[in-house]
């Protein structure tokens, strides 16, 4: 209890802005390398040739996935307030209205979830979301292309990449006490 009192305070709104800006900055800086790793992966018969500037779908998958983790790190109702603050910060960052932001992120969450069904593992859903949003099936060898599914070896590699884009709430919440 005493340890909690010594933590610095941060408002939900400020934390949401830190989260959104941090995720956007991370994707902006790291996506060229991600694209290169995908393009050069030996699981593809032909390079997908993803452009280093084509990060929009990747960013939305990362955001959609990270929002799925919020309820595991915050108490009841605080998780909903945090998500609401994050949606507001995203709307501002993207220049969208709030409803459009919620709708688009929701569509990405549903897409990733559907591609990952029946598993409920968010990391796997993010990897499959990236795989199918970038339409990588067509670049695989004939066997996996014909099945219409991702090569599991590539998906495992993509899981390892996606781990770098999961917000470390534990580390952040270890330093700060979130207040309304």
Image (cartoon, rainbow, N blue to C red):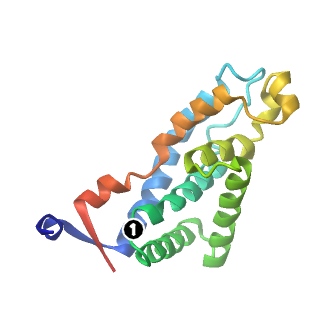
Which element is circle 1 on? loop
Q: Tell me the residue at 57%/51% (across/down).
A: 122
Q: Classify 121 as above or below 160.
A: below
Q: Tell me the residue at 68%/52% (across/down).
A: 112
Which residue of the protein is positioned furthest toward the front in this rendering?
Answer: 118
Q: Nearer the viewer, residue 51 or 17?
A: 17
**Which quadrant of the rendered structure holds the C terminus?**
bottom left
Q: Position of residue 118 (x, y in %)?
A: 70, 50
Q: Nearer the viewer, residue 111 or 99?
A: 111
| Total labels drawn | 1
Q: For the residue carrying disc 1, how many other residues have a C-alpha within 10 Å: few (<14), some (14-19), or many (20+)?
A: some
Q: Tell me the residue at 30%/60% (across/down).
A: 173
Residue hosting label 1? 74
Q: From this viewpoint, is residue 36 visible? A: no
**Is residue 66 toward the left or the right of residue 55 in the image?**
left
**Which quadrant of the rendered structure holds the N terminus?**
bottom left
Q: Position of residue 10 (x, y in %)?
A: 28, 71
Q: Quadrant of residue 159?
A: top right
**Is residue 9 toward the left or the right of residue 20 in the image?**
left
Which residue of the protein is positioned furthest toward the right in this rendering?
Answer: 146
Q: From this viewpoint, is residue 123 visible? A: yes
Q: Tell me the residue at 49%/58% (across/down).
A: 69
**Is residue 40 toward the left or the right of residue 48 in the image?**
left
**Is residue 20 toward the left or the right of residue 10 in the image?**
right
């Amino acid at each position: 209890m005493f340890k909690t009192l010594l933590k610095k305070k941060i408002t939900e709104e400020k934390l949401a802005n830190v989260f959104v800006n941090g995720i956007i900055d991370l994707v902006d800086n790291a996506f060229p390398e991600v694209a290169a790793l995908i393009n050069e992966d030996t699981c593809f018969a032909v390079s997908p040739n993803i452009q280093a500037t084509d990060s929009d779908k990747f960013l939305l998958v990362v955001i959609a996935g990270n929002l799925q983790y919020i309820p595991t790190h915050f108490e009841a109702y605080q998780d909903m307030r945090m998500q609401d603050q994050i949606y507001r910060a995203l709307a501002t960052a993207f220049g969208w209205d709030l409803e459009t932001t919620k709708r688009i992120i929701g569509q990405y969450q549903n897409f990733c979830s559907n591609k990952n069904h029946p598993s409920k593992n968010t990391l796997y859903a993010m990897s499959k979301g990236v795989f199918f949003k970038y339409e990588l099936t067509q670049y695989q060898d004939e066997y996996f292309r014909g099945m219409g599914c991702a090569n599991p070896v590539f998906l495992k590699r993509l899981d390892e990449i996606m781990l770098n884009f999961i917000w470390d709430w534990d580390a952040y919440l270890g330093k700060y006490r979130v207040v309304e």
